[in-house]
Image: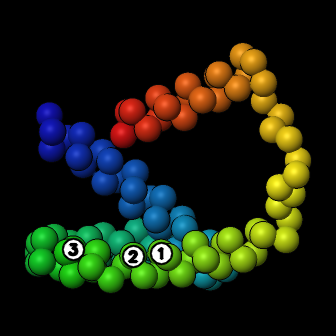
Amino acid sequence: MNVIIGGGYSVVNYVVVGQILSAVSGYTMSITVGIVIIAVLSFVISLFGFKVIHSFEKYSWIITFILFLVLIGQAAPYVDASAPGEDTGLAYAGSFLTILSINFCR
């Protein structure tokens, strides 16, 4: 059962990444080519195991940190810190409980 569920998630992930690669290329690359690229890349990483994954994770935080800094720099001019929060009462409680449940389920 675990193999079937894992295979199902893999198929969904392959299709989504294929669509993302197609969109990033300006739709000059077909979704099928994107799916093949991610499938081959996943297969190669699975052959080398945790050593490759840990080597990647050791340095990938730097790229993520830089991207977050760029995001903050792009969004900062549009942030109005003096604006009050819009949610109060039940709407605020519902938003809080939704975020809490999402984090709890992870």
The part of the image, by quadrant, that contains residue 25 is: bottom right
Q: Earlier in the sequence, mark 2 or mark 3?
A: 3
Q: Nearer the viewer, mark 2 or mark 3?
A: 2
What is the secondary structure assignment of the residue under circle 2? helix
Kindly identify the amino acid type of the residue bearing the numbered disc 1. Answer: Thr
What is the secondary structure assignment of the residue under circle 3? helix
Compare residues 104 and 19 and report the one nearer the observer. Answer: 104
Figure disc tally? 3
Compare residues 49 and 85 and report the one nearer the observer. Answer: 85
Residue 64's disc number? 1
The part of the image, by quadrant, that contains residue 76 is: bottom right
User: Which residue lies under the disc numbered 2?
Assistant: 61
Q: Position of residue 98 (x, y in %)?
A: 56, 29
What is the secondary structure assignment of the residue under circle 1? helix
Query: In this image, 48 relative to 95: left or right?
Result: left
The part of the image, by quadrant, that contains residue 10 is: bottom left
**Could you give the CA–CA distance between mark 2 and mark 3, rounded to whole angstroms?**
13 Å
User: Which residue lies under the disc numbered 3?
Assistant: 53
Task: State the quadrant of the N terminus.
Answer: top left
Q: Position of residue 71 (x, y in %)?
A: 66, 72
In the rendered image, the residue lying farthest to the top is 90
Check the image and report above or below for 7 versus 65. Answer: above
Q: Earlier in the sequence, mark 3 or mark 1?
A: 3
* Dots 2, 3 in contact, CB < 8 A: no
Q: Position of residue 41 (x, y in %)?
A: 29, 77
